């Protein structure tokens, strides 16, 4: 009799915290229900503000939270499980226990609840993420806690995010003055998310329509500039992919005049070399982060060796017979494709992207660029510089140019032209391998990887001007940018068709491409 | 030619042996008569090899399975594998070769709709029997084909209904992204009709197509993001096929499109396709199928055991078209046993009404329109590349191969 009375007394004394704890234990059983119940329970846990809710929600997010057969919620702690409601170790619950599952609705609720619980966290990274989460979950109930967070926030970046979150939360509230501030604040944010919120609010707030329209117009102005910058980036990115794929061909086709239809398959071999290096490095922890860097020389060497073998074994017997070379290399390409399919299977192979190549980088001005594409642009330009240096500055480059300009005189000067041919072809093939390393980051590593790039590569080399590196660079970038500019209004399929037609017309006017070589060498 | 003469001599030899021993009651493991031939018409090279080689292996596994149980009608079952090499006209030639040269009793094959359209006249002309195991756009019904994959009302429409439900995120705008060929275009036409009927106007529908093997998704994903920022909850419906999926999902992940904000439901992405992607950024994106490898229950365990033993890899995944091949094969063996012959006309009659407790955990039935009744599942991608089922139909759904959302079908009978 005494104990319940005491409990009641305590409850009255500590009304506030106890109520919070009640909300916590009261919400917990919902987590054992269906998705809708889980989402409601998560919202209640977030609103209760109980410190015990945080580990529960985190465990739920990571898929570690268990529900026992009898509906108790179990939290993994160390090796065992504890009952989330009582904090007591839960023994022998393993039989009927299963993980609490998530769906998108629960994830959405979870993001909001976690954001609310972490918004006063001492860790700035957590606060930043929390502010973003609260911005997305936008609930009028968050206004007080956001004001509290804003009052003590010192990091400018997080402050901006918190102000946006506050504006988003005010916009769905009932306070008219707050709404008006929110509309102005969101207008100055200049992001698509802010525009989405304003458009959503436009229908429900007839007296705010003019203010909202002004804000949206401001956002549109910023966005259209940003869109142009992003289209340019996308064009450069597509251009750099084309450049990488075409550079090897610029050597083998542009300089040597060999129509190598197996070029795409060399690209594919480079991608598989990347995959093999990754698999090799996976077993050695200290080497694993360097696998992509290591695959650059590995892919170059593998494909260069394959190229040298092809040149010495087959192509050299067919110099001066372009049609036979074309058919023969086409056959070699098919053999390589099927050989890889037999060795590795028809399934795609997974090449992981290192962390620094994942996600989006926000440049000043709010322009967002994807990291992997950015690195590929850098890599493409680096390879171009390397090729330029190799041709202009090395002994090998000098011999190569000599043989191309006049084979006989080069031979009389003591250059072993056969060896130079093999090395030139190997060099071009090795460049294809480098393209494979880059493509493994954005495309499928599958036996047909190369087929998609062979036509594009020839297009770039012919358009840019056969035998001109500058032409290859300008050609690749032009095609990339034009393609991306056409895409939004013509669609991906038609954009490609238009680009092809444009090239056909261009070649009619200028058969030698953008950068035509002049002089005797070009005539022969 | 050599095959027939060989079997002929073997048969003669067996008959002679039987007569010599004068003991007709003692029979060899497989009884008399030529083996039953099963044609396998799947691409083993070219772009579709990625998806179709697993189906070839499934048919071979089933042939092994039936022979392990003493064959069919006391005869041995033999697979005849040809490679149409992802080349659509070659499909028709290889189909003709299977029917006329090898004289197969049944064929399992095709993946893309264009390959099926290419072999259809051959099977009708020569009265063959084809089992087609892939979900498709409907608008077809041949007496020579059994469709064991889903019709649009068994996949596409329930999936979009889910996206529009409270659990699926209350989507009010839909971006239809697809590869540029007959399946995505027809499916999206049906979906547009369905969405219009549900009160979603054309201003809230975005439709984009890309070539096969498209790898540069930056622009399209950025446009979807913009489309989603116009004040209404948006979802993506993807009929992107084959290789283009990997770069598409990578781009979604890299541009930070989270499933909580813009969920993407795919109709052609299964466990096999996800095997080549790092799925961690994709958790929560959806796929609609009639089978997932993660389904519990004895029929699925049986399939998994058979498959992983056959392929000698305990980690190899299964997927929906494989299950459809498996189900089709087992129904065919049941129908042959019921008909007592492999003759196409008799087996066709026996096929209708065949039932099987399929690996999806539901009893499936072959309907008079040559399609199956199937349950529909919506699964969410998990970090390990498997699917977590978040929604399913309470019962198997009957296939409607002629969609009610295509105006021209108003006068057709409903199957």
Image (cartoon, rainbow, N blue to C red):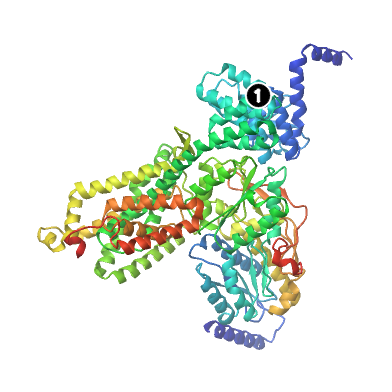
Q: Furthest-left residue in view? A: A412
| Residue located beneath label 1 in the image | A178
* Side of A362 relative to A167 (left or right): left
Residue drawn 65% across and 82% down? B33
Instruction: Say left or right for A343 vs A207.
Output: left
Is residue B206 something one can see in this rendering? yes
Q: Is residue B124 above or below residue A82?
A: below
Taking A146 as reference, is B365 left or right? right
Q: The disc numbered 1 marks a residue on which chain?
A: A
Indicate the position of residue A254 as horizontal and vertical percent values.
27, 59
Tag 1: Cα neighbours inside 10 Å, few (<14), some, or many (≥20)? some
The quarter holding residue B35 reads bottom right
Residue A522 percent coordinates (x, y):
21, 61
Q: Is residue B295 in view from this perspective? A: no
- Of B143 and A67, the residue lying toward us: B143
Q: Quadrant of the C terminus of chain B?
A: bottom right
Tell how many labels. 1
Image: B188 above or below B340: above
Decide which of A416, B143 is in the foreground and name it: B143
């Amino acid at each position: 009799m005494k104990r319940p009375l005491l409990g009641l007394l305590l409850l009255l004394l500590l009304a506030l915290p106890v109520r919070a704890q009640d909300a916590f234990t009261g919400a917990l059983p919902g987590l054992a229900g269906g998705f809708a119940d889980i989402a409601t329970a998560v919202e209640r846990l977030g609103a209760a503000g109980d410190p015990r809710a945080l580990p529960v929600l985190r465990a739920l997010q990571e898929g570690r939270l268990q529900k026992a057969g009898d509906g108790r919620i179990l939290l993994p702690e160390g090796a065992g499980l504890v009952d989330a409601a009582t904090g007591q170790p839960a023994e022998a619950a393993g039989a009927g226990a299963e993980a609490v599952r998530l769906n998108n609705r629960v994830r959405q609720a979870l993001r909001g609840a976690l954001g609310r619980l972490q918004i006063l966290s001492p860790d700035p990274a957590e606060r930043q993420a929390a502010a973003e989460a609260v911005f997305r979950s936008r609930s009028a109930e968050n206004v007080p806690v956001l004001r509290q967070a804003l009052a003590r926030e010192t990091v400018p970046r997080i402050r901006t995010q918190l102000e946006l979150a506050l504006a988003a939360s005010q916009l769905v509230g009932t306070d008219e003055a707050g709404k008006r501030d929110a509309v102005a604040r969101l207008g100055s944010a200049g992001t698509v998310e802010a525009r989405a919120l304003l458009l959503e609010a436009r229908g429900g707030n007839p007296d705010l329509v003019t203010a909202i329209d002004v804000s949206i117009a401001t956002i549109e102005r910023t966005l259209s500039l940003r869109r142009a910058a992003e289209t340019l980036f996308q064009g450069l990115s597509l251009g750099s992919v084309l450049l990488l794929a075409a550079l090897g061909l610029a050597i083998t086709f542009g300089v040597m005049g060999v129509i190598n239809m197996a070029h795409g398959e060399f690209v594919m071999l480079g991608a598989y070399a990347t995959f093999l290096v990754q698999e090799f490095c996976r077993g050695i922890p200290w080497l694993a982060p360097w696998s992509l860097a290591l695959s650059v020389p590995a892919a170059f060497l593998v494909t260069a060796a394959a190229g040298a073998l092809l040149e010495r074994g087959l192509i050299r017997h067919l110099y001066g017979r372009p049609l036979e070379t074309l058919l023969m290399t086409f056959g070699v390409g098919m053999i390589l494709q099927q050989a890889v399919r037999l060795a590795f299977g028809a399934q795609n192979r997974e090449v992981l992207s290192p962390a620094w190549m994942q996600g989006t980088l926000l440049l000043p001005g709010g322009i967002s660029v994807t990291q992997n594409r950015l690195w590929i642009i850098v890599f493409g330009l680096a390879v171009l510089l390397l090729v330029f240096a190799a041709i202009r500055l090395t002994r090998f480059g000098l011999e190569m140019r000599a043989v191309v300009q006049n084979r006989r005189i080069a031979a009389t000067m003591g250059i072993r032209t056969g060896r130079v041919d093999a090395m030139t072809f190997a060099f071009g093939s090795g460049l294809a391998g480098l393209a494979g390393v880059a493509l493994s980051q954005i495309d499928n590593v599958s036996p047909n990887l190369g087929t998609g790039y062979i036509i594009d590569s020839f297009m770039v080399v012919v358009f840019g001007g056969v035998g001109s590196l500058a032409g290859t660079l300008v050609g690749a970038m032009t095609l990339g940018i034009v393609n991306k500019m056409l895409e939004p209004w013509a669609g991906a399929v038609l954009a490609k068709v238009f680009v092809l037609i444009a090239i056909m017309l261009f070649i009619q006017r200028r058969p030698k491409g953008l950068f035509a070589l002049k002089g005797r060498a070009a005539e022969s | 030619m050599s095959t027939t003469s060989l079997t002929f001599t073997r048969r003669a030899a067996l008959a002679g042996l039987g007569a010599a021993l004068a003991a007709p009651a003692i029979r060899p493991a497989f009884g008399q008569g030529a083996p039953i031939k099963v044609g396998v018409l799947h691409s083993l090279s070219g772009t579709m090899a990625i998806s179709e080689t697993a189906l070839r292996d499934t048919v071979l596994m089933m042939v092994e399975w039936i022979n392990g149980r003493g064959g069919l009608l006391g005869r041995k079952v033999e697979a005849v594998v040809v490679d149409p090499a992802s080349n659509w006209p070659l499909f028709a030639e290889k189909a003709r070769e299977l029917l006329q040269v090898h004289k197969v009793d049944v064929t399992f094959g095709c993946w893309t709709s264009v390959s099926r359209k290419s072999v259809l006249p051959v099977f009708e002309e020569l009265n063959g029997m084809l089992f087609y195991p892939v979900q498709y756009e409907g608008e077809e019904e041949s007496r020579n084909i059994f469709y064991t994959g889903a019709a649009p009302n068994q996949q596409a429409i329930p999936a979009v209904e889910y996206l529009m439900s409270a659990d699926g995120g209350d989507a009010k705008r839909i971006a239809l992204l697809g590869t540029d060929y007959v399946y995505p275009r027809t499916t999206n036409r049906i979906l547009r009709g369905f969405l219009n009927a549900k009160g979603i106007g054309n201003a809230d529908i975005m439709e984009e197509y890309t070539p096969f093997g498209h790898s540069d998704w930056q622009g399209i994903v950025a446009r979807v993001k913009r489309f989603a920022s116009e004040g209404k909850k948006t979802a993506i419906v993807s009929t992107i096929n084959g290789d283009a999926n990997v770069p598409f999902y990578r781009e979604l992940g890299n541009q930070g499109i989270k499933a909580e904000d813009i969920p993407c439901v795919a109709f052609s992405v299964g466990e096999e396709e996800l095997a080549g992607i790092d799925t961690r950024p994709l958790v929560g994106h959806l796929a609609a199928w009639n089978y997932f490898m993660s389904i519990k229950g004895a029929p699925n365990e049986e399939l998994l055991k058979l498959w992983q033993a056959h392929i000698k890899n305990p980690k190899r995944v299964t997927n929906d078209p494989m299950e459809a091949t498996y189900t089709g094969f087992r129904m065919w063996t049941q129908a042959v046993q019921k008909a007592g012959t492999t003759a196409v006309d008799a087996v066709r009659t026996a096929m209708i009404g065949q039932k099987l407790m399929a690996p999806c955990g539901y009893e499936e039935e072959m309907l008079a329109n040559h399609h199956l009744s199937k349950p529909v599942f919506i699964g969410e991608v998990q970090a390990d590349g498997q699917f977590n089922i978040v929604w399913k139909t309470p019962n198997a759904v009957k296939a409607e191969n002629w969609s009610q959302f295509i105006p021209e079908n108003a006068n057709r009978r409903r199957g």
